Image (cartoon, rainbow, N blue to C red):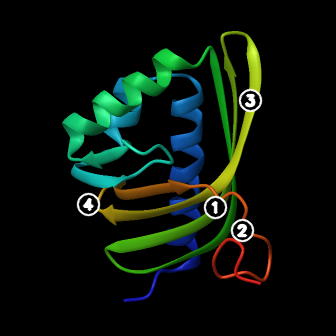
Amino acid sequence: MALTKEQKDSVIAMMDRYAELYGAKNLEGLLAICAPGICGYGSGVDEVVQGIASMKVQTKRDFAQADTITIRFDIRDVDGDMPVAWVMADCVFDVKVHGTPLRMTGRMTAVLRNTGSRWLFSMIHFSVPAPGQAAGESFPGSR
């Protein structure tokens, strides 16, 4: 069954919750909204999540390497078929690393599963556009 407006709104609220918990560096809170089998990719070469244990390791590393973190999602689309929802969003990470501000502008996709009582993140993917790939190019330097 297609998601209702209320279900879509609750998925958006979970995206906001993810950003809030991540920004607060609340590891236990963040892991609590993830499914045990969560999987996904971050923007780094070695950022691969396969299960809650690796999500914990990756997130602990993220938190340790940033003084402060703020995430903002600009939701482009939420859709789904109960009990699964998928999200497409533009994403901005504002962090301070060793006191120096850094902004990472990228894209986030997520798949959430409804357990009957709440939504859990089952898949996440954060990426940044390929350097050197201009608008209108399918591959860097192809035009």
Q: Is residue 86 left or right of residue 55?
A: right
Q: What is the distance, in whole Å, between disc 3 and disc 4 at their CAs? A: 36 Å
* Amino acid at circle 3: Leu
Precedes in sequence: disc 1 or disc 3: 3
- Disc 1: CA contacts within 10 A as few (<14), some (14-19) or many (>=20): few
* Amino acid at circle 2: Gln
Q: Which residue is mark 4?
A: 115
- Disc 3: CA contacts within 10 A as few (<14), some (14-19) or many (>=20): few
* Amino acid at circle 4: Thr
Precedes in sequence: disc 3 or disc 2: 3
Closer-to-camera residue (101/143)? 143
Q: Is residue 50 left or right of residue 133?
A: left
13 vs 5: above or below: above
- Residue at image position (23%, 40%) is 52
Closer-to-camera residue (78/104)? 104
Q: What is the distance, in whole Å, between disc 2 and disc 4 at their CAs? A: 40 Å
Residue 121, image x, y percentages: 36, 54
Q: What is the distance, in whole Å, between disc 3 and disc 2 at their CAs? A: 21 Å
Contact flag, marks 1 and 2 (Cβ < 8 Å): yes
> Disc number at residue 130?
1
Question: In the figure, residue 39 lies in which quadrant?
Answer: bottom left
* Amino acid at circle 1: Ala
Q: Which residue is mark 2?
A: 133
Q: Is residue 58 left or right of residue 131?
A: left
Contact flag, marks 2 and 4 (Cβ < 8 Å): no
